[in-house]
Image (tube, rainbow, N blue to C red):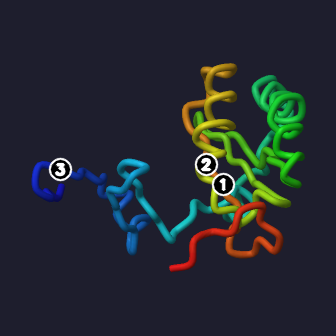
């Protein structure tokens, strides 16, 4: 637990390592955390772990939402979203095309993709972006230069 004025930040001991180098900013978008660490994508897991099963009814429903609702909109910007895995209530998505490296990808994910999926599939509690945005070669909107 850490206090910054009236703001108290509580981080579980098992998450501290995942937040090394993260920054919390308050700007016009509200409270925004920038974390240089990305969740380990399911395909980068230990070899002794089973492959994720994308044949479950929830996975099929999520893929249908992506293909029928989300990707047609993203395609207008040359982008798309794909399901990588579902695990413990989390859906792991990879963005590509114009979405990979786009300065608005986080907003698209939180205000569009996440809302549509979580409204339709209550079993999904979190959407985790496993995209390597730094490798994006043709983002629709350039990210701000730091």
Label 2 Cα neighbours within 10 Å, binned few <14 / some 14-19 / many ≥20: some
Residue to which mark 3 is pinned: 7
Residue 125: percent from the left, percent from the top? 55, 32
Marks 1 & 3, CB-CB < 8 Å contact: no
Q: In this picture, is 101 found above or below 87? A: below
Mark 1 lies on residue: 105
In this image, 7 relative to 69: left or right?
left
Q: Earlier in the sequence, mark 2 or mark 1?
A: 1
**Residue drawn 39% across and 74% down?**
21
Residue 146 point in image, percent of width and height: 50, 80
Of the numbered discs 2 and 3, the one sitting upstream in the chain is 3
Query: What is the CA distance from the residue labelled 2 to the residue labelled 1?
Result: 12 Å
| Mark linked to residue 53 | none
Q: CA distance from mark 2 to mark 3?
A: 25 Å
Is residue 133 at all visible to an observer of this figure? Answer: yes
Q: Quarter of the image containing the N terminus?
A: bottom left
Mark 3 lies on a secondary structure that is strand
Q: Residue at x 39, y 52 (%)?
A: 28
Q: Residues within 10 Å of mark 3 (few under 14, many from 20)?
A: few
Mark sitting earlier along the chain (1/3): 3
- For the residue carrying disc 1, how many other residues have a C-alpha within 10 Å: few (<14), some (14-19), or many (20+)? many
| Tag 2 residue | 128
**Residue for point 66% across, 54% down:** 105
């Amino acid at each position: 637990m850490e206090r910054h004025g009236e703001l108290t930040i509580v981080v579980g001991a098992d998450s501290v390592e995942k937040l090394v180098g993260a920054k919390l900013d308050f700007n016009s978008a509200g409270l925004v955390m920038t974390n240089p660490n990305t969740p380990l994508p399911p395909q980068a897991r230990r070899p002794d772990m089973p492959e994720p099963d994308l044949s479950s009814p929830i996975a099929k429903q999520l893929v249908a939402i992506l293909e029928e609702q989300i990707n047609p909109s993203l395609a207008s910007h040359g982008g798309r979203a794909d399901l990588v895995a579902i695990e413990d209530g989390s859906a792991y998505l990879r963005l590509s095309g114009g979405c990979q490296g786009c300065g608005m990808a986080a907003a698209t994910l939180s205000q569009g993709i996440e809302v549509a999926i979580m409204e339709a599939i209550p079993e999904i509690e979190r959407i985790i972006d496993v995209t390597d945005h730094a490798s994006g070669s043709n983002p629709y909107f350039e990210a701000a230069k730091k």
